[in-house]
């Protein structure tokens, strides 16, 4: 029974979202330079092209996947390192082992090790979109935005037959934003929202762009408030990053009282010791001075 349950999990992770990627959510993955430690990474894009694989939970691969899904990342790395040694004759299982170990490394902030594992997934199965997606997320988090664009473009190309393009589009839009290619960023970020209007990460990224883009022609405070409010509602107002985006949106709209109120709320939701706290605090001081926040 347990093995069957894991079969369903593996199928879902390979073909849909991984709140152990997954960031995602990657993860959420938004315009911030810093990956939020308090939140599992942004959701991986759904609809990938990997098939389900039955994995015995008594094996090191099975134990490792279960540990990663349970956020026991150090245990996951231990089991999956053993699995990588054992699975060289089975490319599908080997790719799974590398991917889940990469996710565990990512959640621990060990990004270069995560990237090496994701690149191994690409080497083993160059037609698997999630390998490129995961690598692209790391490229973005390490400020390698052109490489992020290239990886996400490849992920999108491999996903074209299905409809789950919201997160790779949003991530590519984020990379274009940092490259100051604002027209391309706008196209991808808004397309991501159209693809999945219930994806909180895509909504948050689009709202941040509309609220904080240094080019005034792309800013729209009212639209940013709507996008960010929807993201906060979807995640039940528990995500500090999304509330911070809503504060920036109100500041762009000139409503600094609401900007201050929501920035204080974001700070109250953010766990103590979180590295984003100084950035949130600095934005709060801006809003108290009746100044909006500008990215880049």
Image (spheres, rainbow, N blue to C red):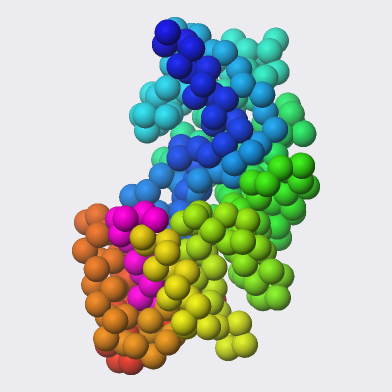
- Which residues make up the magenta segment? 234-248
Closer-to-camera residue (229/180): 229
Count of number-bearing discs: 0
The part of the image, by quadrant, that contains residue 264 is: bottom left
Q: Is residue 231 magenta?
A: no
In-image side of 145 versus 256 (left or right): right
Q: On the picture, is 106 further left or further right than 134?
A: left
Image location of residue 106, percent across then percent down = 49, 41
Q: Is residue 164 above or below residue 211?
A: above
Rendered view: 126 above or below 88: below
Q: Indicate left or right for 296 with 271 as reference.
A: right
Q: Quadrant of the C terminus?
A: bottom right
**Frontmost residue, 220 versus 27:** 220
* Residue appearing at x 67%, y 76% in the figure: 182
Residue 247 position, x and y percent, is 35, 76
Q: Main secondary structure of the magenta part?
A: helix
Q: Is residue 91 visible?
A: yes
- Left or right of 233 in this view: 273: left
Q: Identify the residue at image location x=68%, y=13%.
A: 90
Give coordinates of residue 114: x percent, y percent.
55, 38
């Amino acid at each position: 029974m347990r093995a069957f349950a894991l079969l369903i999990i593996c199928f879902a992770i390979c073909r849909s979202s991984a709140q152990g990627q997954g960031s995602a959510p990657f993860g959420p993955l938004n315009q911030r330079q810093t990956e939020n430690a308090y939140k599992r990474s942004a959701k991986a894009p759904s609809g990938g092209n990997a098939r389900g694989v039955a994995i015995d939970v008594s094996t090191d691969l099975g134990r490792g996947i279960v540990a990663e899904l349970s956020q026991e990342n150090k245990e996951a790395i231990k089991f999956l390192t053993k699995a990588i040694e054992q699975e060289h004759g089975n490319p599908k299982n080997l790719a799974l082992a590398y991917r889940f170990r990469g996710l565990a490394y990512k959640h621990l902030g060990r990004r270069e090790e995560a990237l090496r594992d994701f690149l191994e997934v690409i080497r083993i199965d160059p037609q698997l979109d999630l390998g490129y997606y995961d690598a692209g997320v790391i490229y973005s988090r390490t400020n390698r935005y052109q490489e992020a664009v290239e990886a996400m473009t490849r992920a999108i190309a491999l996903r074209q037959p299905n409809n789950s393009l919201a997160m790779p589009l949003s991530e590519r839009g984020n990379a274009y934003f940092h490259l100051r290619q604002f027209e391309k960023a706008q196209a991808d970020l808004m397309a991501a929202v159209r693809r999945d209007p219930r994806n909180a990460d895509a909504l948050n990224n689009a709202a941040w762009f509309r609220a904080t883009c240094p080019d005034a022609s792309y800013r729209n405070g009212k639209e940013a408030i709507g996008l960010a409010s929807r993201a906060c509602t979807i995640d039940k107002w528990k995500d500090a990053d999304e509330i911070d985006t809503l504060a920036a949106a109100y500041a762009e709209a000139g409503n600094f009282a609401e900007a201050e109120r929501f920035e204080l709320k974001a700070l109250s939701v953010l766990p103590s010791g979180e590295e984003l706290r100084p950035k949130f605090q600095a934005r709060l001081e801006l809003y108290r001075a009746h100044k909006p926040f500008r990215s880049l």
